[in-house]
Every structure is written in C-alpha cells, then in structure tokens.
C-alpha cells in the first residue's frame, strides 16, 4: 500500500517541488495551501498520480483541525508530514519594521506549523510510525540585518523540532529540521510584496539553491532506514558562506 504524505504550502517553491517528487514516486500526496486554483492546477498537471488537495489557511486553527480530522479514510494514516508553509515579510530593521508583518510571520511560521503538527500527531503516535519534516532556515542559526522576527521564528522551529523528538521517544516517529540557505523561489517576491525588480536583484550574479535541491533532500532523507534520524540538516549553495562577525568601528 502506498505511503501517504501531507505537504503544507504546496502551491509554490519547496512545497510544490516536494509534492511533485513524492507523487511521481508513487506516494499518495495530500497538498494544502490557501490558493485553491493553484492546488487544482497542480493536481491536474499530474493526472496519473494519487493527489488530494485541501484548501485551508494554516494560521486558522479550526480550519486546520477540521481539514485533517475529516480526511477521507484512504488518506487518514499520514506517514510523512512536511511542514513547509512559511514566509518572510519585509527586510526593515526592527525599529522601523511593520508590526503586522511580524504578526503574520509568527502566525504562519510558528502557529501554523504547531497546529498542523498537533493535528497529525495522534494518528502517527497510535501507529508508532511517522516522519515529520519541518522547514527551518539558516536564518534560525545566523543573524542578518532585517532578519529579526523571521530569523526568530525559524530558531523556534529548530528548537521545537528538537523538543518534539524528545517528546516522541518510544513512538518510532522521526523528526528532521531542514535548514536551507540562499534559495531562489517565490520567497523574495513574497518578502518584497510583489516587487519583482527588487526580488530579482537578490539573485543577480550568483547561483542560489533551487526548489528541487530541497525537495531532493527531503525525499532522500525519507528513504533512510527507520532506525536512522537526522535531527538537523543545514544546506547552503556553494556560492554562500558564513561571512564572519562584524565589528563596528568609529
């Protein structure tokens, strides 16, 4: 029987690429997102695959639990959860940052991930089987100017992933925090609120990770034997490295 994968934020970027990879590999794939037309377009693009689309907003607790608790019987026993839904908004320094942007990042990157995880966990625990992938970021490990709340939310995801592993001891459920670096997806388009010119400048003259790089990483880890758990994996493009500490001088 095919394993079942649930992927949040599957309408673009890492989520879309990951869903496509698992679907083409013969898994039953549940794709979720807020944009119904994109979910349907994805499903229609792979007519030979077993795909169920669920349109809901991860920041809405009732929507999350209603969608997952009312899954059709054939899709209830989720084997793999990929908590991909997340975003960055703005790149302003903390004193000038938009508080609404901060709220949205906390609601999506932290609360949304918590709601989906909590909704899926009971069936995994009951079956003593499952794998949870959380999409963190190197921003949760390394600070950068303007990364204030976004980086803080990803640091939360990292620590939550480690704590989740501890809480789930004895259940055989694996948890991995995926921590991508510089990546070319719709990330910057969202961060700069549709300013395509500004977003394109982010990637000019360099080679970033692409969405397939992260999808391939998630899929490869999912194929490891059940006794193997990778707690965290930090992935940067070759063109990116740690720049060292900055010393301010008068």
Image (tube, grey):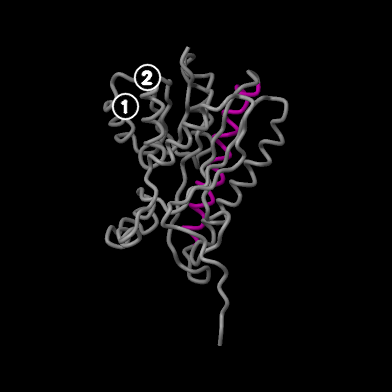
Expressed as whole percent of the image width and height from the top left, the position of residue 36 reads 33, 34
Which residue matches tag 1?
A: 43
In this rendering, is residue 40 above or below 153? above
Where, by quadrant of the figure, is residue 247 drawn?
bottom right
Expressed as whole percent of the image width and height from the top left, the position of residue 243 reads 51, 65
Where, by quadrant of the figure, is residue 120 drawn?
top right
**Where does the magenta region start and end?**
99-125
Q: How many marks?
A: 2
Which residue matches tag 2?
A: 50
Identify which residue is drawn at 45% across, 32% down. Answer: 7
Number of other residues with Cα within 10 Å of mark 1, as a class: few under 14, some 14 to 19, many 20 or more? many
In the picture as drawn, the residue positioned furthest to the top comes out as: 1
Expressed as whole percent of the image width and height from the top left, the position of residue 58 reads 48, 39
Give 147 or 52, whichever is nearer the viewer. Answer: 147
* Residue 241 highlighted magenta (yes or no): no
* Residue 121 highlighted magenta (yes or no): yes
In the image, 188: left or right of 147? left
First-in-chain label (1 vs 2) = 1
Identify which residue is drawn at 43% across, 57% down. Answer: 89
Quarter containing the C terminus: bottom right
Expressed as whole percent of the image width and height from the top left, the position of residue 76 reads 51, 19
């Amino acid at each position: 029987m095919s394993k079942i994968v649930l992927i949040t934020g599957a309408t673009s970027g890492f989520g879309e690429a990951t869903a496509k990879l698992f679907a083409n590999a013969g898994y039953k794939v549940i794709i979720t997102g807020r944009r119904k037309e994109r979910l349907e377009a994805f499903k229609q693009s792979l007519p030979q695959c077993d795909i169920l689309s669920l349109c809901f907003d991860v920041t809405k607790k009732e929507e999350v639990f209603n969608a997952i608790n009312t899954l059709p019987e054939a899709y209830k026993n989720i084997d793999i959860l990929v908590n991909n839904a997340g975003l960055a908004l703005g790149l302003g320094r903390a004193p000038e940052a938009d508080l609404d942007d901060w709220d949205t990042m906390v609601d999506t990157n932290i609360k949304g991930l918590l709601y989906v995880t909590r909704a899926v966990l009971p069936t995994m625990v009951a079956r003593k089987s499952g794998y949870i992938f959380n999409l963190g970021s190197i921003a949760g490990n390394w600070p950068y100017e303007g990364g204030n709340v976004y980086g803080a939310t990803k640091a939360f995801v990292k620590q939550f992933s480690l704590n989740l592993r501890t809480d789930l001891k004895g259940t055989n459920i694996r948890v991995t925090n995926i921590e991508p670096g510089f990546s070319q997806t719709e990330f910057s388009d969202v961060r700069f609120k549709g300013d395509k010119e500004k977003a394109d400048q982010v990637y000019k003259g360099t080679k970033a990770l692409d969405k397939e790089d992260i999808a391939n990483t998630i899929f490869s880890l999912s194929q490891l034997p059940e006794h193997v758990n990778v707690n965290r994996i930090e992935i940067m493009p070759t063109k990116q490295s740690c720049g060292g500490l900055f010393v301010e001088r008068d």
